[in-house]
Amino acid sequence: MRPVTEPARRWSRELAGRVVGGWRERAAPAGDEVTRADLRLVPVALAALAATWLCTGGGRTGWWVFSLATAATFGVALLRRSPVWWATTLVLLAFGVTAAAHAYALHHGPLARLAAAQAVVGVELEVRGDPRAHAAEGPRPAYVTLPARVLSLEGRGGAWRLRSPVLVVAGGSGPAWSGLLVGSRVRVSGRLQPPQPGDGLVAVVRVASDPVLVAEPAAGLRLVERVRRGLRRAVQARGEEARALVPALVLGDTSAVTPRLTQDFQTTGLTHLTAVSGANLTLLLAFVLSLARWAGCRGRPLRVLGLLGVVAFVGLCRTEPSVLRAAAMGLVALAALGTGGRGAGVRQLCVAVLGLLLLDPYLSRSLGFQLSVLASGGIIWWARPWSRLLHRWLPLVVAESVAVPLAAHLVTVPLVASISGQVSVSGLAANAVAGPFVGPATVLGFAAAGASLASPGLAALLGFGAAWCAQAIITVAHLGAALPGSAWRAPPQPGVSAWLSLVCLAVGLAMRSVLARPGLTLLLVTVMVGALVIAPRQPGWPPAGWVLVACDVGQGDGLLLASGPRTAVVVDTGPDPAALDRCLDQLGIRAVPLVVLTHFHADHVDGLAAVLGSRAVGQIWVTGLASPAYEARAVQDLADGRGVPVVRPAPGVVAAVGDVGLQVLGPLPHLTTGEDGSSVENDASVVMLATVHGVRVLLTGDVEPPGQAALLGAGLDLRADVLKIPHHGSARQDPAFFAASHAQVAVASAGLHNDYGHPAPRTMALARSLGMLTVATSEHGSVAVTAGPGGLRVVTQR
């Protein structure tokens, strides 16, 4: 028997020679892709990705799975005596140990110890990324986050010099934090907190004071910032969305992108255009080099032009880890679009993945990295043959502009769906139509940024061209998102992700036959248009005879009470107009005689535009406490603009709205104090008892224990069949309030993977202990309650 090390030695020599010299592939006919590609590095790269992901999670489960996987792979290698299996085993072990060592070093220093104790410390920080302002959301005030590196630390009687990555969270959104430039060094005091497992951070630094500037950024970083400001000035005169999208396309700066445009980009699968990713860089380089080849540029000058494009990209976007990752992935995909072929491209992609994971094992947990790898892989495998087929009946520039984003979108659909919970049906068409405008917008944006240093007038002219192309992309996004079938729900479950992966693979394999025939391509486009203009219907949804639906609107409330044919009373509208609009469309609601906004937090009122936009609305009820004032003003302005009266019902008011009977129970007048402003606003929620076809529903808004106790103390009849669990199922509840409802069903409305941990497990356990059936929109999607001869029945979307 041969020693087990012999095949490993032989394979390592073969691998080293081939990585340096390139895989030999069988020649293919001119104009066609290579017929056979060597994929032996793929399992090796996947092993590295799996090992680093498992060993950076910070849990014992990951270690057990890693150990079992390593043992299983080693056993297969012994049986098969395959060089590929030996390499996979060695890489799995080596990268797992490296990731574990990296995680240990990250979480066992003085900063990590003080973070575990939540100590108050003084730190000197170096800003490593652009500050991001976050608007107030419900009870959470506005704040700013920025990535930084701790250079020095003082606290609990010690002082240390460090270079540790942290996330700074600063209360408020003033210019002191949001105006900091990358590379600035500041000193500040704050409280440390442990980060989320797998974040790749040592600590979170929460501060409430302004920073003290210690040192300005280096001259190079100041020049880059000057160029970035020049780009913003060059498009300043354009429309709001266009002047926001150009910096997003060129720099990945999405700070000025409107919420509506962000939502429409998500719906149409165009979000990757505004991220600093390998796919984005590939789109830029593909356009530039296609234009250069059309102009007659070949050979070394063409490669130099590509490298200059990468240098410009990294320079303007700065040498942050995400930018360097994108540059590596972009170069790999570019090589495949050039003369390297699919086999060489796959090999280079795998080598790039191995190198990046060796430098930073936490990249395996980065969504951006995963999307970059998938998008680059799709471009490598499909973009070149697809563009050649399209070039038979389309100009080369158009063919590549369509093929590259199409390939990138198709391979990322399963991952994006597992995160967003929806499949962008319009994504294929939107990427194909918007693709030809992405390259020109990005190139003209880069040119405008550079020209701003010498000629503001020339920069403005180039900025006009970039904004014009960006406006075309915006139009595609808005039109695509407006189509009824633009996005289909896809529950984030392993089975659904596997099914989507098989579908995308089948579509990718069939695309070659389709794109080679203009008539078949036109037929496919026609079928896709038909799918887009027809709203998707889920079998069994909505259920017949529903009386209450808790819409899946994310982290917020959006409830509907059936008041008649195609009409409903809406209680709260959630944080996202698109989510509520989708729910109303699915239920066929065309008229809303009454909207009740229990209180003015964003997660209850920001979706109001969806109700007022295309449906007849009779009246809006609101709480008597107009706080937060800016949200109350926004609601009043929106209602005034549509001519809808706003009423503040007092406790004791009884009303009949179609098939719905309403009794207002709260807020009680004396609820004017609380622990903080947010609690006062929550306890000022409109609390109602609704009756629909004999089913009693207790609607509670976000009322907290003091408000719940006050309602109990008032001697009100709280008996109901269905309890809307207060405050999204937060942990702060009054058990006596729950018991007084005697409800059969308890519904919690919360967002999937929300930051608050809603609904709290102990709250759901409390409801179950009282004999209630518990359901949550975060887990089950939209929830419907029906009534019939057999009693209440609960139907969920997933």
Image: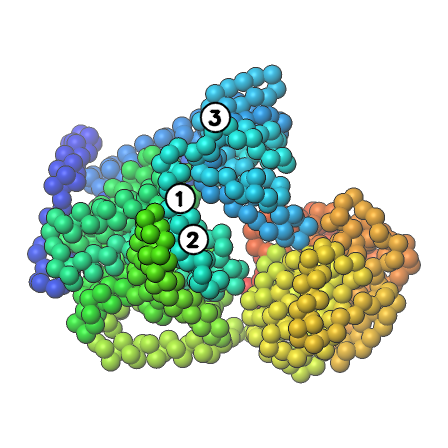
On the image, which quarter does residue 503 sit in? bottom left
Q: In terms of depth relative to the viewer, which is nearer, 761 or 177?
A: 177
Task: Give the labeled residue for mark 2.
Answer: 232
**Element at label 3:** strand
- Can you tell which of label 2 and label 3 is closer to the viewer? 2
Task: Give the labeled residue for mark 1.
Answer: 226
Percent position of residue 477, x then y = 43, 67
- Can you tell which of label 1 and label 3 is closer to the viewer? 1
Percent position of residue 139, x then y = 68, 50
Task: Give the labeled residue for mark 3.
Answer: 151
Percent position of residue 694, x then y = 78, 75
Q: Quadrant location of the C terminus? A: bottom right
Q: Residues within 10 Å of mark 1 (few under 14, many from 20)?
A: some
Kind of residue at disc 2:
Arg
**Element at label 2:** helix
Say which residue appears at 33% left-offset and 43% top-offset. Answer: 315
Q: Quadrant location of the N terminus? A: top left
Kind of residue at disc 1:
Arg
Q: CA distance from mark 2 to mark 3?
A: 32 Å
Q: Is residue 572 above or below residue 352?
A: below
On the image, which quarter does residue 696 sit in? bottom right
Q: Is residue 45 visible?
A: no
Kind of residue at disc 3:
Leu
> Quick check: 341 left or right of 322?
left
Q: In terms of depth relative to the viewer, which is nearer, 410 or 781?
A: 410
> Quick check: 578 left or right of 452?
right
Q: Residues within 10 Å of mark 2 (few under 14, many from 20)?
A: many
Say which residue appears at 27% left-offset and 76% top-offset. Answer: 521
> Quick check: 717 left or right of 56?
right
